[in-house]
């Protein structure tokens, strides 16, 4: 049996109807006229209630993985962020108007995800908080884009091992003989391209397919988890 979700003056049959209502708050509307009008005060009130609940329950939006975590304000998300996403992904110029129909289409296709749904991201809870602090505002690891996850994992290795401009040498036992300092160095070198965004680097990123990125993410999580745990247990060096 589905359980009702009650938020202040709002009531939803389930998470699907709640998120559908959230999407509606973001969309430009006609409000009984032939022409679309933009956002309303009532939309903002409902949006504010829902986005708080979504954060508490561990949800994030696939296309905008940090919006819920940051509790992005209504106008910034519904107007600025949505338009910017369309401009970048649909090839609109900086001064081109963004059609309201494009905004409505993107909002309709937003995908809601939950951090608990991703069994491949079983990061230790304490480590997860550290990763969030290291990630330069990107949020928890599993709420980040794939490229941002690679940048964050690269940063994490540096955070744990760099001291006075030099990297510490770790014991071979940390990875049970399967990985060593050279492997860590290669991982950092390979993923450096996700920490920067020059034109040449963006071209280099295109050489990485999704499978390679996911492999490096799994590898990076294993590296960071073992380094963190062994450091905590004083068995790192």
Image (cartoon, rainbow, N blue to C red):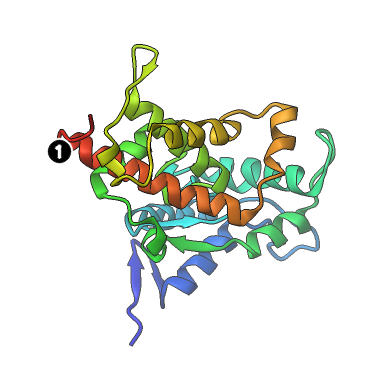
Camera-side residue: 208 or 52? 208
Q: Quadrant of residue 207?
A: top right
- Relative placement, left or right, of 215 versus 82 is left
Above or below, 118 relative to 1: above
Above or below, 110 relative to 93: below
Q: Position of residue 213 (x, y in %)?
A: 57, 49
Q: Position of residue 22 (x, y in %)?
A: 52, 61
Q: Residue at x 51, y 34 (%)?
A: 186
Task: Categorize mark 1 by other alpha carbons within 10 Å: few (<14), some (14-19), many (20+).
Answer: few
Q: Residue at x 32, y 44 (%)?
A: 177
| Residue 137 in view of the camera | no
Camera-side residue: 47 or 145? 145
Q: Residue at x 68, y 62 (%)?
A: 31
Q: Quadrant of the N terminus?
A: bottom left
Q: Quadrant of the C terminus?
A: top left
Residue that extends furthest to the bottom in the rendered view of this protein: 1
The residue where tag 1 is placed is 233
Camera-side residue: 192 or 134? 192
- Total numbered badges shown on the rendered structure: 1
Q: Position of residue 199 (x, y in %)?
A: 75, 28
Q: Quadrant of residue 95?
A: top right
Above or below, 121 relative to 164: below
Camera-side residue: 111 or 208? 208
């Amino acid at each position: 049996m589905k359980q009702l979700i009650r938020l202040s003056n709002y009531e939803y049959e389930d998470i699907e109807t709640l998120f559908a209502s959230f999407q509606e708050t973001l969309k430009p509307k006609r409000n009984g006229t032939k022409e679309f009008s933009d956002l309303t005060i009532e939309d903002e009130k409902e949006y504010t209630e829902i986005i708080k609940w979504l954060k508490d329950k561990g949800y994030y939006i696939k296309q905008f993985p940090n919006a819920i975590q940051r509790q992005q304000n209504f106008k910034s998300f519904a107007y600025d962020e949505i338009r910017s996403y369309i401009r970048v992904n649909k090839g609109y110029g900086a001064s081109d108007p963004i059609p309201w129909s494009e905004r409505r289409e993107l909002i309709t296709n937003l995908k809601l995800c939950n951090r608990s749904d991703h069994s491949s991201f079983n990061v230790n809870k304490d480590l997860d908080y550290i990763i969030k602090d290291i990630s330069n505002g990107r949020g928890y690891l599993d709420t980040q884009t794939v490229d941002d996850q690679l940048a964050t994992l690269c940063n994490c290795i540096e955070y744990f091992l760099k001291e006075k401009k030099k990297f510490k040498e770790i014991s071979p036992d940390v990875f049970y003989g399967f990985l060593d300092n050279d492997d860590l160095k290669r991982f950092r070198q390979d993923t450096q391209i996700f920490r920067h965004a020059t034109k040449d680097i963006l071209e280099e990123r295109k050489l990485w397919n999704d499978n390679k990125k996911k492999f490096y993410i799994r590898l990076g999580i294993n590296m960071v988890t073992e380094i963190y745990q062994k450091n905590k247990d004083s068995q790192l060096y």
